[in-house]
Image: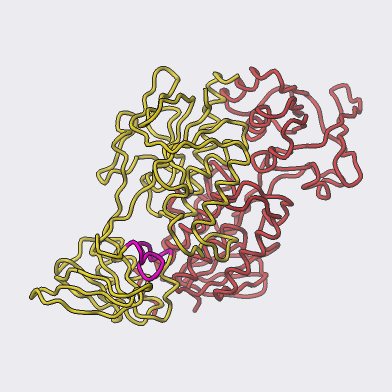
Chain colours: A red, B yellow
């Protein structure tokens, strides 16, 4: 039997593997899409300590090589269900059934997309879903942003610190975030809000050059910009695990800093956990904590030989 | 006035600086000893995601270059006191007085040393204070360990997974850790305990080759080993901050995952915070969280122009 199954081979899952493997445990990672998760599609990472600048795909590849050198196994399978019978976890995927002594869920989240043509092509070429990650690349430039809840408000405030103007497009004529953030935003003269608007198109060949939006009179307008930050929400996908974990109202798995779920031996790491800050650094930290916790759990279980 | 003063330029402090600077804030780091903190003296780091193998000093230098390129300022000063008057923090050092809108304490901890001749020289050459960090370098080899509380118990169990024998030296004939750990340790046939012993010397030229210890009859014995893990405790040094933060009974600054202390605008990041796992990954995560929290605090404060 495998010691630890890790659901998701993003930064959190692979860091959990790194710690578990270095602690002498066997590890199987199950990934349904891309190795590396979100960071793999990020063209430029500059906010990870000691790595001045790295492509997200390179970060992911390095980490993957790091864990395969230690003996990590990977299967490209989608997890359908996790069951616990006695002290044994059974993980059912679309192709297989695996057993393990401990399981770490590191399934990540997805950023909601506007669903516009070329949106995906422009990621890293003007379109970003994370101002904390990518905002600094547009220091000194005017930027655009779409969204009306807390992330959008926070991103606007952040960008307004170093961008001369932040053009903020909202679907309605109000915000849906914390009052303190709305108040802070209103005090910022360089945040220009475009209420009752809907972004309908992206302009540009290889790099974003502008957007088109529909105003409240139904007219189509053009706005030139090199950067569009899309902050319209994130989608965790943890429904398959609800028999063993609790979800908050947004669908994140409820767990504290110790990454422990309500089921003994089952841990959660990274963006799919309830937390405030979702960054590469915080995902890696969760991975280390969950990896070590799973190892300690197995040791104390006394079932490993 | 500076936006954010960071006390300590280790991994946590420098990552906090990285996030704050990228958010457009000005940052002053105050460091009393070594840039990089604990990692700077670690000869080999292999458990940080995407960095297969790096010298600790190189990690520290990279991170330092990363933040100085963004405009971080550093002063080699020891912080004596932090005061808050209204919304302004005043940080008094042995040489100077600085003011800031927010402060992050990232003062780290020190591992207790045995105080033996050559102990410091052997760090990275057989002597280690962290089995989680360095244990994997001795896979398949017999190792020695000194200590009798939770860290020592956890390290022994960890090492016993991949070392044929773990020779554990304890000052008394009992352990001072959790019962479950003691029980798990007793079930491990490859952990050999040497009770009532005191390590009195380290053998070797450039690499550790063995130790000498005094047994309970006062006889000096020699034990050959390539590795000695010293797990006799850690020393946080947060007394200078007690006017603004609460300490737990071991001296760590009480704060949760959000890194917020009881004083608004004052955050704590890294090993000096109350937490279970103290690793480079968890320090970096704290840095990101505290850095962003300090930025958000300043923005909501509305005092920056």
- Vertical comparison of B209 with B112: above or below: below
Q: Is residue A112 above or below residue A258?
A: above
Q: Is residue A155 above or below residue B159?
A: above
Side of B261 where A113 appears, left or right: right
Residue A181 lies in the magenta stretch: no
Task: Name which residue lies at 47% across and 28% down.
Answer: B102
Q: Position of residue A257 (x, y in %)?
A: 45, 49
Seen at 82% across and 36% down, the residue is A226
Question: Residue B198: percent from the left, percent from the top?
Answer: 17, 68
Q: Residue at x 25, y 44 (%)?
A: B249
- The picture places residue A299, in percent across and down from the top left corner, at 37, 70
Predominant SS of the magenta segment: loop
Residue at x 43%, y 37% (from the top left corner): B7
- Position of the C terminus of chain B, as image quadrant, is top right
Frontmost residue, B58 versus A78: B58
Q: Residue furthest left?
A: B217
Q: Position of residue B136 (x, y in %)?
A: 44, 72
Is residue B55 visible from the viewing direction of this image?
yes
Magenta region, residue range: B120-133
Between B172 and A269, the one nearer to me in the picture: B172
Count the labels in the image: 0
Task: Give the quadrant of residue B163.
Answer: bottom left
Is residue B121 located in the magenta-colored stretch of the structure?
yes
Q: Is residue A271 visible?
A: no
Q: Going by the picture, which residue comes out furthest to the front?
A: B205
In which image quadrant can residue A195 be found? top right
């Amino acid at each position: 039997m495998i010691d630890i199954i890790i659901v998701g081979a993003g930064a959190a899952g692979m860091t959990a593997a790194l710690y578990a493997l270095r602690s002498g445990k066997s590890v199987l990672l199950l990934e349904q899409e891309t190795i590396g998760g979100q960071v793999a599609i990020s063209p430029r990472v500059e906010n990870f300590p000691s790595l001045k600048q790295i492509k997200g795909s390179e970060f992911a590849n390095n980490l993957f090589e790091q864990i395969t050198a230690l003996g990590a196994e990977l299967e490209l399978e989608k997890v359908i269900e996790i069951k616990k019978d006695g002290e044994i976890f059974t993980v059912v995927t679309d192709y297989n059934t695996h057993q393990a002594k401990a399981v770490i869920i590191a399934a990540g989240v997805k950023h909601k997309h506007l669903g516009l043509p070329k949106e995906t092509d422009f990621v890293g070429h003007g379109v970003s879903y994370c101002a904390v990650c990518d905002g600094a690349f547009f220091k000194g430039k005017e930027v655009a942003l779409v969204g009306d809840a807390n992330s959008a408000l926070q991103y606007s405030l952040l960008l307004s610190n170093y961008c001369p103007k932040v053009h903020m497009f909202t679907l309605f004529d109000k915000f849906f975030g914390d009052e303190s953030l709305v108040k802070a935003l209103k005090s910022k003269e360089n945040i220009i809000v475009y209420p009752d608007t809907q972004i309908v198109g992206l302009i540009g060949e290889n790099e974003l050059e502008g957007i088109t939006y529909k105003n409240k009179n139904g007219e189509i307008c053009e706005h030139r910009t090199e950067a569009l930050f899309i902050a319209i929400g994130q989608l965790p996908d943890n429904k398959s695990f609800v028999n063993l974990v609790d979800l908050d109202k947004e669908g994140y798995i409820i767990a504290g800093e110790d990454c422990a779920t309500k089921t003994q031996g089952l841990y959660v790491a990274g963006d799919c956990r309830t937390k405030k800050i979702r960054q590469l650094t915080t995902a890696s930290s969760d991975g280390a904590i969950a990896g070590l916790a799973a190892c300690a759990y197995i040791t104390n279980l006394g079932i490993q030989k």
